[in-house]
Every structure is written in C-alpha cells, then in structure tokens.
Image (cartoon, rainbow, N blue to C red):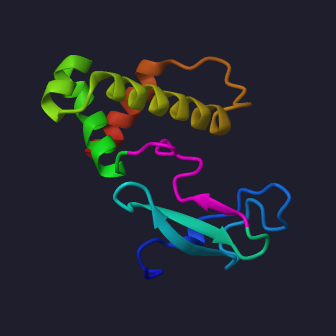
C-alpha cells in the first residue's frame, strides 16, 4: 500500500489520552492496512500511542459497508428521484439501506452545523436579502 493513496497528514489521532490527539500534520499517522469486503477502507495507526482507527472515523461513511462513491452517488440522486422507492429502483440498493444512509448523512450535517454555527449573535436576518446577495455574487 502506498502512502500516496491517502494524504495521511489530514488525519489526527482519535485517542483522547494521546499527546497528539486532534493534531493534524504531526507525522504520527501512518497507513496500517485496508479492510472491508472489498478492502476499500484504510485503517490508520498513530505512531505516538499505537491507537488504530478507520479513515472514515468522524465522517458520514463511518461503519458503512458500501464504498463512499456508491453512497455519494445514491444520495446525490435523491433530489432528482424525489422518493426513496424511486431511488431504490434506480440504484438497485434496498430502500431501508438508502433511508439509513440519508439518516446518517442528515445527523452528520446537523453535527457539523452545530459545531460551526453557534454564538452568532445575529439580531435579525432577512433570508431573501441574503440569497439576493449570493445570486448577484454568482453572476460576477
């Protein structure tokens, strides 16, 4: 396995007791092995504490058995198909699996929003004016 497959400098140790916990680019994260049915998930190891974790830890793909590309392609089709059953017929995935992916993605998005969007202290925001500004910016 080559280290060029995944940029390990973007990862950090998930072990809260590790001195390098949460620190990117320390050179302590190395690829260990690939696992899963099709060996598509990379297992990483922290050289500092020896803790191992999935490349998908902390993402919407954590603990999913389907490759990222298939999950992303399926979720991206959801607005176009408009229904879970239609999406199931179009992709060949079970509707319960698709509903689980969408549920996991929604919960992850909520966590990301709560992490980044807090303590904004806004008085009053008029959404239509914000969107008008964004649309004007896209034109220029």
In the image, residue 90 lies at what x, y percent?
A: 13, 30
Asked if the stretch drawn in magenta spans residue 2, the answer is no
Choose between 62 and 4: the one closer to the eye: 62
In the image, residue 26 lies at what x, y percent?
A: 71, 76
Choose between 50 and 106: the one closer to the eye: 50
Residue 96 visible from this viewpoint: yes
Range of the magenta residues? 51-65
Q: Residue placed farthest to the front in the image?
A: 37
Position of the N terminus, as image quadrant, is bottom left
Q: Residue placed farthest to the left in the image?
A: 90
Residue 83 visible from this viewpoint: no
Q: At x 26% / y 19%, what residue is drawn?
A: 84
Q: Is residue 45 above or below residue 97?
A: below
Q: At x 35% / y 45%, what residue is drawn?
A: 66
Q: Is residue 72 above or below residue 95?
A: below
In the image, residue 80 lies at what x, y percent?
A: 18, 27
In the image, residue 76 lies at what x, y percent?
A: 27, 36
Q: At x 54% / y 28%, what residue is drawn?
A: 107
């Amino acid at each position: 396995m080559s280290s060029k497959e995944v940029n390990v400098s973007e990862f950090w140790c998930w072990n809260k007791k590790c001195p390098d916990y949460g620190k990117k680019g320390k050179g302590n994260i190395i690829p260990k092995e690939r696992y899963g049915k099709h060996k598509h998930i990379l297992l990483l190891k922290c050289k500092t504490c020896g803790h191992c974790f999935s490349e998908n830890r902390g993402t919407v793909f954590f603990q999913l058995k389907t490759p990222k590309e298939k999950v992303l392609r399926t979720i991206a089709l959801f607005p176009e198909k408009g229904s879970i059953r239609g999406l199931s017929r179009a992709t060949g995935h079970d509707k319960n699996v698709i509903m689980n992916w969408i549920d996991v993605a929604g919960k992850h998005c909520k966590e990301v929003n709560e992490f980044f969007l807090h303590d904004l202290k806004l008085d009053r925001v008029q959404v239509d004016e914000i969107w008008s500004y964004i649309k004007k910016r896209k034109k220029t």
